[in-house]
Image (tube, rainbow, N blue to C red):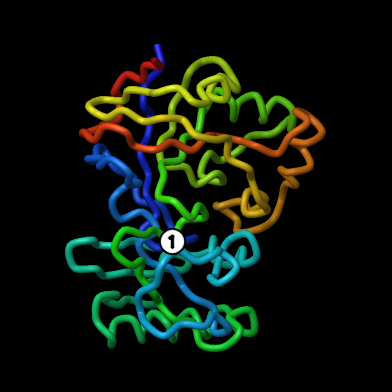
Amino acid sequence: MTQLENIYRYPVKSLSPEQLGSIDLDPGDGLKGDRRYALALGSTLLDSTTTEWMPKSNFLALVKHEKLAALETSFDAETETLTILRGGRQVARGNLGVPIGRTMIEEFFTAYMGDQARGRVRVVSAAEGHSLEDQSKPSVSIINLATLRDIERVLGSSLDPMRFRGNLYIDTGEPWQEFDWLGREVVIGGATLKITERTGRCGATHVNPETATRDINLLKALQQGFSHTDCGVFADVITGGSIATGDQVSVN
């Protein structure tokens, strides 16, 4: 029996995940609040504090900026307040919904990233109907924990599942079974999702989320062990509804 083990969203792109017990999904959308905000590089051309989808190369992102993993962040959606800790000590806090709050966060990241910021970092939010995830179309990413165990077998070492920054973590008991679901519908709780494509991985998975170091060449390991560099699948929400950890996952 396959069940939904964990739900995560990432309020600010490339910063700490937020673990959820449940969430309502809407047709054609991803997880509400997922990658709602991002930290634009100083070199990114912007004329507003909101933006439609842009490639991750325009933002601070783990694929190039592993220092981000050394920070622990929390986001209060009700007050839109981002709190940043380093080594357990608060180093910045600001309301991303107002100019002065954004400025406080921007100043911190501009100083923290140094030359890598390419100028002054700017906090941007996703325009209505958009998300700042890596995909241009809002979607839900699914990771099979059984697949991660198989990758660990090839690596000969353990992997923190958060390297993959998925939204829904399931456990089918069989590795790579999720690849067989392409084009099929999956029912989780009150929602129905259609599996659309495999998730191609990038160098962000090389970053250890605990140590903020690049300690594994995961792309090379995937290629050598499995002849591809994919892990996880993307899904579109077809029928909206509530999902919660512990819900059964069934494939039609």
Please indicate whether residue 87 sits to the left or right of residue 150 in the image: left
Q: Is residue 12 above or below residue 250?
A: below
The residue shown at (55%, 64%) is 55
List x then y, in percent, for residue 198.
Answer: 58, 35
| Residue at horizontal 40 percent and vertical 50 percent from the top | 138
Q: Quadrant of the C terminus?
A: top left
Q: Is residue 75 left or right of residue 168?
A: left
**Residue at the spot x=77%, y=37% of the render?**
221
Judge whether 186 appears above or below 31 on screen: above
Residue 46 in the image: above or below residue 88: below
Residue 193 picture location, percent across and down: 36, 30
Q: Toward which corner of the image does residue 132 lie, by quadrant?
A: bottom left
Residue lying at the far left in this picture: please name it.
78
> In this rendering, would 20 be left or right of 199?
left
Amino acid tagged 1? Leu
Residue 204 position by quadrant? bottom right
In which quadrant is the N terminus drawn? top left
Relative to 249, does residue 46 appear above or below in the rendering?
Answer: below
Q: Residues within 10 Å of mark 1 (few under 14, many from 20)?
A: many
Left or right relative to 123: residue 136: right
Q: Name the residue: 43% across, 33% down.
A: 169
Point out residue 213 in the picture as x, y percentages from the top left corner: 66, 58
- Picture coordinates of residue 97, whole percent (x, y): 25, 75
- For label 1, the SS is loop
Res. 24 image quadrant:
top left
Q: Nearer the viewer, residue 198 or 148?
A: 198
Q: Residue furthest top?
A: 1
Q: Which residue is mark 1?
A: 132
